[in-house]
Image: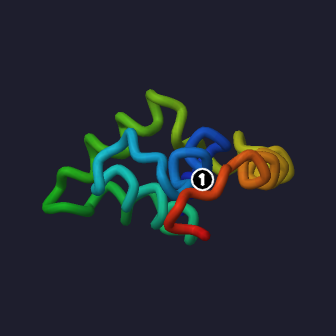
């Protein structure tokens, strides 16, 4: 089964307060993070998952697992978290 992994760009998108993608696109990213296979992702949303996966691949939010360096993703994720400023809701 071929796996797709979220890229560092996807991890930035999934931060609280950041929402440039649709709910369905974000759902696909979250499922990919949990190691859902590419065929499973493509079957989502009554077949619309195929187009969503293609769009996310083209935009650099997803990549085949062998092309994503997990250490680079983790470092990006941690550095981005440190840059987030708390909002009034967080205080």
Image quadrant where residue 34 sits: bottom right
Q: Residue furthest left?
A: 46
Relative to 68, 87 lies left or right: left
Tell me, yes or no, if residue 2 can be seen here.
no
Please name whichever residue, 22 or 7, is drawn nearer the observer in this view of the structure.
22
Residue at the spot 60% in from the left edge and 45% down from the top edge? 12
In what element is the residue under mark 1? strand
Relative to 84, 16 lies left or right: left
Horizontal and vertical percent position of residue 82: 79, 52
Horizontal and vertical percent position of residue 7: 63, 44
Tag 1 residue = 5
Describe the colour scheme in one phrase.
Answer: rainbow
Q: Is residue 38 above or below residue 54?
A: below
Horizontal and vertical percent position of residue 31: 46, 66
Residue at the spot 26% in from the left edge and 61% down from the top edge? 43
Residue at the spot 37% in from the left edge and 45% down from the top edge? 53
Please name whichever residue, 51 or 27, is drawn nearer the observer in this view of the structure.
27
Image quadrant where residue 26 sits: bottom left
* Quadrant assignment for the C terminus: bottom right
Tell me, yes or no, if residue 76 can be seen here.
yes
Horizontal and vertical percent position of residue 81: 73, 54
Please name whichever residue, 74 or 37, is drawn nearer the observer in this view of the structure.
74
Relative to 6, 85 lies left or right: right
Residue at the spot 13% in from the left edge and 61% down from the top edge? 46
The 10 Å Cα crowd at callout 1, few under 14, some 14 to 19, many 20 or more, is many
Circle count: 1
């Amino acid at each position: 089964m071929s796996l797709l992994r979220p890229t560092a760009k996807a991890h930035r998108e999934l931060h609280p307060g950041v929402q440039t993608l649709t709910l369905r696109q974000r759902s696909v990213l979250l499922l990919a993070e949990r190691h859902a296979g590419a065929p499973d992702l493509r079957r989502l949303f009554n077949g619309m998952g195929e187009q969503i996966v293609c769009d996310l691949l083209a935009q650099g939010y997803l990549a085949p697992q062998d092309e994503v360096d997990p250490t680079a993703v983790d470092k990006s994720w941690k550095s981005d978290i440190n840059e987030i400023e708390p909002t009034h809701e967080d205080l």
